[in-house]
Structures are given as structure tokens and as C-alpha cells.
Image: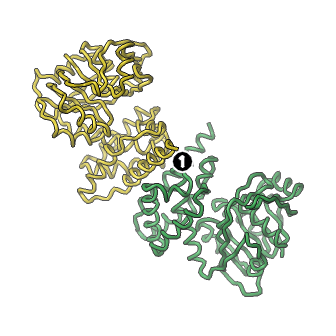
Chain colours: A yellow, B green
Amino acid sequence: MNVTIVGAGSIGLLIAAFSSKVGHKVTLITNRESQAQILNEKGLIFKTNQGTVEKYRIEAVAVKEIETIRTDCVIFAVKSYHLKQVLDRLSGSIQAKAVLFVQNGMSHIECLSLFNHEEIGLAVVEHGAMRLEDNLVSHTGVGRINWSIFQGSKEDSVLPNFFSKSEDVNFPFYHKKDWQKMLQTKLLVNVAINPLTALLQVKNGALLTNDSYYKLMSEIVRETVQVLGMNGKQGLEKVIEVCQATKENESSMLRDRAKGQKTELEAIVGYVIRKANEQSQSVPSLFFLYEAIKGIEQQSFRGAGQ
Amino acid sequence: MNVTIVGAGSIGLLIAAFSSKVGHKVTLITNRESQAQILNEKGLIFKTNQGTVEKYRIEAVAVKEIETIRTDCVIFAVKSYHLKQVLDRLSGSIQAKAVLFVQNGMSHIECLSLFNHEEIGLAVVEHGAMRLEDNLVSHTGVGRINWSIFQGSKEDSVLPNFFSKSEDVNFPFYHKKDWQKMLQTKLLVNVAINPLTALLQVKNGALLTNDSYYKLMSEIVRETVQVLGMNGKQGLEKVIEVCQATKENESSMLRDRAKGQKTELEAIVGYVIRKANEQSQSVPSLFFLYEAIKGIEQQSFRGAGQ
């Protein structure tokens, strides 16, 4: 199967590596020409969770070189806040049977009406991955990928084939019937863990071991499940489970803060606040988190410019 | 006049220096014997705001050496969270005509019933001061001291005399008729600036220049004035005025955080939250700040123990 992956950050490179491993023909669309060049020259280096190193030949193309993409499946693996811009740039050029989104948060859902592809899938990546160099990705935590059909897929169609081909135990796929519930659960976990750990500058596990941080996290979960109409007890249990499993990890938002980079605040906390406003619900903890992280981003960009 | 100052931190040393300067005979009670020794041997060095250096002979005594204090005026200049412990230790030993408290926050008010002294005064210190060595204090910001009578003072009594003797322009004193209003205003400023700057790790001025931080500060002011029954517009104006005047300063709570020390959270935010609970008022931003700083303290003590 021809698989085109748009975005060569940690998740894009990770998906490129395992797609190559199971035998798909991978084309990777990069933002920078220099990254495409090094990937074409030196291949994609994949450092597995066991510490072994694998190498894959893939085709890499910089986004500005793209005229038309013809592929079986295109996977968008760019940050949520870049997605709209990438879609504006590429939407006329993509001729794919299936489209798959792997974004955090919810803001990509609002873009789906732009697509009239036969098959649209949504996925949630629970792996840990870190891009160490432009052509080197490290699989820092073995998780799983949950996926679900948003629109039009049958048993013999592209997405089920793409996923069923992978039987490598380090990349387990789980099909979920209800994409909304799947994304909501991921969203809740992201809302509860990411901004708080970024604000407090702690690893995920501190939200369980520090009484005060646990109270704050519980309050954030309480507000979020109410807005999303989820079960509060199950929601809190899921968040605790993920905190425990990733206790030694730094959340993506904490890493973004440390690097002075933009975070996925809008797609994560911003989405829930917008929903709360629509429902006239008060979410003061989410408001606090939202403005605090937004302010930190503003501070950091100002600092960077000096 | 004999002035006894309990506590030899930045504020205690500052008050010792200006009391000496205007001719009072100063006894300083220190926590550590080593600090008393160096003060007695080398004198108190005072670095003025203009950068000149002055030296004062004072008598210093470690708290454990105290049997009885006989003095005209005793000034308590210890952190709010140490006051109760110091009072338990010293209350039977103090024979003073007047007692003056200079604590941040409100928790010392709850201790005043322990005193049956003729005169009890309350003061609010708006100077910047930093203890650079055990016997060296720097006057980092010229402000003023507001003071008020809590109990029993006449024109010829101790506290008015103490304050009227000082005519040095770098230590202006302002008498306030209403001690509650005076303390509330100081409390509001502390609640609005200290925990937020400590959490976000920014100087006071950032609360005005960063839109998101300004929103958070305004929300904190809104909750606090409601609990304290203050005028919201005047309250916000006062906080903005102090932020502007101290824009290059780090708040005491931020400095405490940086040093991994306990903060005055209970006397400042804790007091307002307790009042809010008594009134069944919801103060979610104060709750967030309170638990965040409490968690940071817990984290920092744990870190220090490792």
C-alpha cells in the first residue's frame, strides 16, 4: 500500500518507521527541504524501545515541492495548530482513497467538512516518541494506537487493510467503534495532564504523588467531564491510569514549554472552554490553566525575540 | 527609646537600622546564636538605596538566651508562619509598654488576643529590603511604612513617639486611622501579586504587560475584594499601582520559591480562602493558586530531602 505521511515530527517519523517495517511504501512530506534531503540521503533511522537501531528507505519530499499527491492513504501527523495551514496548502493536491488524522485535541474535527474522501479515519497515538535528529526517531514508550472510522469504510477498504497489515507487537492497533468517545477520552487525558504539568514543571507522576497537585487535577477532570458529558468516575480513573503508566514522562506541553515552543493549548484546553461557553458552564480551573499557558507562551516568544 | 526587634530577617534588620539611625537604642532578637554573635562583633551594616554604606552598633541576643525582655516597644518582625511559635516562646518574657506587628497577611490578627499590653500597633512595610549577609541588609526599594493603632494609644504614648521621632525621608511613616482597611489593602496586594508571580516565575511587572497574566490577576482581585467586602475598582487600581511601582522586583513568594523555602501562603491566600468558606463563597482562582503553591512547597521539600 502507498502511504503518504504529512509531517516529519516525532509522530510522523514513528508512523513512517512502522509503516515501512510492515511493508508499506512510504512517502514523507516534510516542512523543511533540508530534512527531506537528509532523509533521502541517509534513510530514516529508528531507535526501538529495546535500544536496537533499524534503518528504512523512504521517499521524502518538502511540502513546497508537492504538486499532486496520489496515494492510497494520507496520514496527517502535524501539530494541531499547523493543520489548517497545511490543509489550505495541500487540500487541492491530495488524491487519496483514505485520509487519517492523528492529532491531539479536537480542533481537526472542525476541519473534516473540507474533505470529501471516501474514507476518513481518526487515530489516537499513545506511544512515546522523540525526534532526536531530522532523520532519527526514538521510540521512548510503547503504547498503542486506537483508531476509528469517521466516514465510509468497509471491510475490504483502505484503512482496515492498512491497520490489519501491522502485526508487530510493538505497534498494536485497536479499533474503536465510537470515534467521539475515543477522542473525548484522549482529550480528557490531555486536558488533565498536559497544561498542569507544563505550568508546574513536573513529570506526569507528580500529579498522583503530590496531594495538592492531585486536588488540582481532580478539579480539572471534574470540570472537563461535565462539559464533555462523560462519566466522572471513569474519567478520573482513566487519567490516573495514564499518569501512573507515564509517571516518568514529561508531557508534550511541558516539553514545548521547556523549548519555548507553541503548545497545543487551543486544540486541548481551548476546545473544552469553547464548549463550556456554548453551554454557559463555568470552568474556572480551565480558564486559569488556559490563560497561564497562553501567558507563558507570550512571555517565551517575547524572551526569544530579545 | 528602647526598641526590641524580634526577628533578624530583611525586615527586622531594616527596622533595626532606621531605628538606630534616628537614635533609638536597639536590641535585636535573632533565631541563631551565630547571627547574634556576628552582629555584636561587626555591627549592623546598612546599604542605603543610594548605594552608601552605614554601620550601626546594636545589641543582638539569640532567642534561646532570653529570660526577660524589658523595653518600651517590642516589634515582631518574623515571618507570619513563625509568629505563633515565637509568641509561645516569648510571651511570658516580654515586659513592654507597646507591641508592634509588621507581618504580611492576616494570621497575626488571630494572635492579638494573647496580648494584654497597653498599646498594640499594626504596621505594613512597603519597603524593599534584602538580607545579603547575617549583618548586612540592603534597602532595595524605598517605600513607606503605614501604621495604625489596634489598641490603646494616646498622643504622649509610646507608639506615636516612636514613629514621630523618625523624620528621615527614606523612612516615611503614615498613620492610618482604620487598621482593618490598611491590612486589607496590603492583603489584597499580596494575594494578587505574590502567589501568581511565584507560580509563573515572573517579576511583578509581567502581570501588567502580559495580557493573559493580567486577566488572571484581575480575576484574583475580583474574588478577593468580594470576600473582603472591598471596593473592586479601587482594589484593582491599588494592585496595578503597586505592580507598576515594583515592576522590576521579584515578590517575596517568588524569592521563597527560588530558595525552596516555605512561603507565607497561609497568612495570605489561606486567610482569604478561610473567610470565603465562612461566607460560603466560591473562590476557584484562589483555590487553584493555593493548591499550586502548596504543592510546589511540598515538591521542593521533598526535592531537598533527596
Report the amino acid beneath label 1: Ile
Examine the image and state in which quarter residue B222 appears: bottom left
Residue in the image at 20% along x and 17% along y: A2
Q: How many discs mark residues in the rendered view?
A: 1
Residue at numbered disc 1 = B296
Residue in the image at 48% along x and 53% along y: B291
* Residue B50 position within the rendered picture, expressed as x and y whole percent measured from the top left: 75, 61
Q: Residue B93, can we see it?
A: no
Toward the viewer: B25 or B276? B25
Residue placed furthest toward the right: B41
Q: Is residue B225 left or right of residue A24?
A: right
Toward the viewer: A63 or B183? A63
Residue B281 lies, with reference to residue A136, above or below; the image says below
Question: What chain does badge 1 belong to?
Answer: B
Residue placed furthest toward the bottom: B155
Q: Is residue B25 left or right of residue B217?
A: right
Q: Is residue B220 left or right of residue B303?
A: left
Residue B182 lies, with reference to residue A89, above or below; the image says below
Q: Residue B8, can we see it?
A: yes
Crowding at dot 1, Cα within 10 Å, few <14 / some 14-19 / many 20+, comes out as many
Please state, as top left, top right, bottom left or bottom right, where the N terminus of chain B lies in the image.
bottom right
Residue in the image at 57% along x and 49% along y: B297
Q: Secondary structure at mark 1?
A: helix
Q: Is residue A23 left or right of residue B297?
A: left
Please state, as top left, top right, bottom left or bottom right, where the C terminus of chain B lies in the image.
top right
Residue in the image at 31% along x and 28% along y: A7
* Residue B292 position within the rendered picture, expressed as x and y whole percent measured from the top left: 49, 51
Examine the image and state in which quarter residue A35 appears: top left
* Residue B294 position within the rendered picture, expressed as x and y whole percent measured from the top left: 53, 52
